[in-house]
């Protein structure tokens, strides 16, 4: 009897150690996968320049940020600033130069997107509507719009709402008009004639969000949501509100 | 005096009595009672705190089923866990070799019959209860469907959008008036999703080119979560939005506001 008690103890200790080690291995692998899943995305930080009174009557810090959308990943500069820097996918469209955006909390953010891609028809017509911007509108080449034709969209800039107990909702959908075929942006430019889209929205408190394009600009897999739409760093990324 | 060999065999009652007097069996029953009590406490007191708020009769039904199924299955889970624990405690250990001629393990007929009968009854009870509950909800929903608020739900990678055809508005958030039957007509614009307004107790597939219908009646004011419950791509984890159960006046005000701003509302 005296000889079995230590043996029982060893068994129990062994079982506990095995469980703890197993949990540690799973946590370690998960932590490393998470840490390496999206390393160093090109980050654009909005710059505050003065204040502005919004339609709600409140005065906010006024922040500005610009970005672009390109038919060829190399033109976006989001994957390195060289002719062949295309993230390994020269035929994929991409936002650029930034795929991660840093915005101030409780601010009036004005974003300008220079967009240079063609398009076809949206899977869901809802995303042809402007949602969540100040006044429910965007300005396209100097003209205010509240929606586009669902077959006139090249991409969308859509921040997911992601309301949680610890962060405010922030849902924005901006449809971006497709470019006309055959026109160049300027003589000698590899880019087609693009559009300049400007819009504003008001951020809430601090939070981490994701954005992605709702136009099916991937390959034919999954209704256009394969390839580029199944990867991060081209047509999707993150938004940090700090 | 001649007699048959059968006369020497113990009766089933004697076999059960002998079985229950074994030390390992009695220990297992004590452990089983303890684990059963733990699971019952989990089911009755802990689960209701872990589960989401109840904002419809359907969600209340879901929670009731979860709780009572946990209680019903507690003895089964408790005894199985107790057998595993008893085996673990009494397993051979140490440097000495195991006994060469240990008692053989053989089928114990009455115990097998009792165990099979009890677990079968529990399963039948669970199935009948679940089907009865679901049929009750369906009947109630159909009875109210002629006055239901219709909401067309579209899932697309990786967002939800809601169209209110009678009101002529669309939205990214799901606003519903309290105590008004609602009929969700759910589709997908691309891959399969699953529409899950959590606190309303509804979960239904969103398929491309096919409409699925689910009904509920929200009966508590507040905010609820809308999630996708079908792994649908790289941003599936972010396919969430919020819903609000509002007073009828607030809902009508929201509709009017949406119409005034072109019919599309955040």
Image (cartoon, helix red, strand yellow):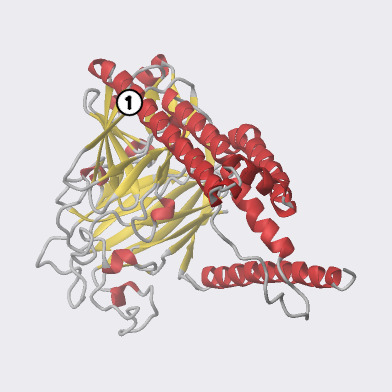
For the point 65% across and 33% down, which residue is it?
B45
The residue nearer to you, when weighing B230 against B120, is B120
The subunit letter for the residue under badge 1 reads B
As drawn, B45 above or below A238: above
The residue nearer to you, when weighing B203 against A109, is B203
Query: In the image, residue A56 lies at what x, y percent?
Result: 47, 31
**How dense is the environment of label 1, judged by Cα within 10 Å: few (below 14), some, or many (20 and up)?**
few
Query: Is residue A130 visible to the viewer in this orientation of the structure?
Result: no
Residue assigned mark 1: B135
Query: In the image, residue B4 lies at what x, y percent?
Result: 53, 49
For the point 39% across and 15% down, which residue is it?
B248
The residue nearer to you, when weighing B187 against B144, is B144
Q: What element carries label 1?
A: helix
As drawn, A11 above or below B259: below
Query: In the image, residue A60 lies at what x, y percent?
Result: 53, 41
Query: In the image, residue B34 lies at what x, y percent?
Result: 71, 43
Task: Report whether B138 appears left or right of B53.
Answer: left
Task: Report whether B15 appears left or right of B238.
Answer: right
For the point 54% across and 40% down, which residue is it?
B73
The residue nearer to you, when weighing A179 against B33, is B33
As drawn, B177 above or below A55: above
Q: In which quarter of the image is residue B197?
A: top left
Query: If the image is split into quadrants, where does the N terminus of chain A sit?
Result: bottom right
For the image shown, how many numbered marks are present on the structure?
A: 1
């Amino acid at each position: 009897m005296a000889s079995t008690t230590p043996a029982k103890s060893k068994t129990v200790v062994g079982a506990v150690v095995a469980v703890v080690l197993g949990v540690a291995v799973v946590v370690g692998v998960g932590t490393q996968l998470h840490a390496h899943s999206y390393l160093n995305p090109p980050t654009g930080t909005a710059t505050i320049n003065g204040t502005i009174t919004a339609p709600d009557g409140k005065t906010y810090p006024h922040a500005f940020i610009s970005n672009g959308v390109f038919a060829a990943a190399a033109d976006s500069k989001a994957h390195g600033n060289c002719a062949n820097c295309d993230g390994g996918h020269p035929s994929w469209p991409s936002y650029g130069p930034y795929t991660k955006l840093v915005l101030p909390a409780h601010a009036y953010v004005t974003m300008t997107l220079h967009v240079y891609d063609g398009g076809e028809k949206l899977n869901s017509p809802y995303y042809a509507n402007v949602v969540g911007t100040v006044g429910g509108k965007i300005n396209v080449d100097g003209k205010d719009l509240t929606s586009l034709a669902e077959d006139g969209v090249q991409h969308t800039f859509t921040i997911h709402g992601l309301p949680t107990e610890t962060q405010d909702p922030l849902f924005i959908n901006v449809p971006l008009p497709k470019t006309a075929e055959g026109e160049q942006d300027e003589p000698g430019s590899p880019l087609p004639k693009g559009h300049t889209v400007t819009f504003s929205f008001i951020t809430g408190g601090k939070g981490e969000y994701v954005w992605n394009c709702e136009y099916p600009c991937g390959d034919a897999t999954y209704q256009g949501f394969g390839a580029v739409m199944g990867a991060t760093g081209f047509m999707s990324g993150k938004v940090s509100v700090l | 005096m001649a007699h048959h060999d059968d006369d020497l065999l113990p009766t089933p009652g004697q076999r059960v009595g002998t079985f229950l007097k074994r030390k390992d069996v009695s220990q297992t029953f004590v452990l089983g009672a303890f684990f059963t009590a733990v699971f019952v406490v989990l089911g009755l007191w802990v689960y209701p705190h872990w589960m989401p708020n109840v904002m419809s009769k359907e969600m209340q039904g879901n929670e009731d089923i979860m709780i009572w199924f946990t209680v019903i299955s507690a003895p089964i889970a408790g005894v199985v866990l107790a057998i595993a624990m008893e085996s673990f405690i009494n397993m051979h250990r140490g440097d000495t070799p195991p006994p060469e001629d240990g008692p053989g393990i053989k089928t114990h007929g009455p115990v097998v019959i009792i165990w099979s009968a009890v677990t079968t009854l529990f399963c039948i009870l669970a199935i009948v209860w679940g089907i009865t509950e679901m049929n009750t909800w369906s009947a109630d929903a159909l009875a109210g469907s002629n006055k239901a608020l219709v909401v067309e739900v579209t899932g697309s990678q990786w967002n939800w959008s809601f169209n209110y055809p009678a009101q002529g508005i669309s939205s990214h958030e799901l606003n519903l008036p309290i105590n008004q039957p609602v009929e969700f007509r759910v589709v997908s614009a691309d891959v399969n999703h699953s529409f899950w307004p959590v606190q309303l107790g509804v979960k239904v597939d969103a398929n491309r080119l096919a409409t699925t219908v689910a009904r509920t009646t929200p009966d508590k004011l507040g905010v609820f979560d809308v999630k996708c419950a079908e792994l649908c791509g790289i941003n599936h984890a972010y396919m969430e939005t919020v819903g609000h159960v509002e007073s009828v006046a607030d809902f009508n005000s929201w509709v009017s506001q949406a119409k005034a701003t072109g019919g599309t509302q955040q």
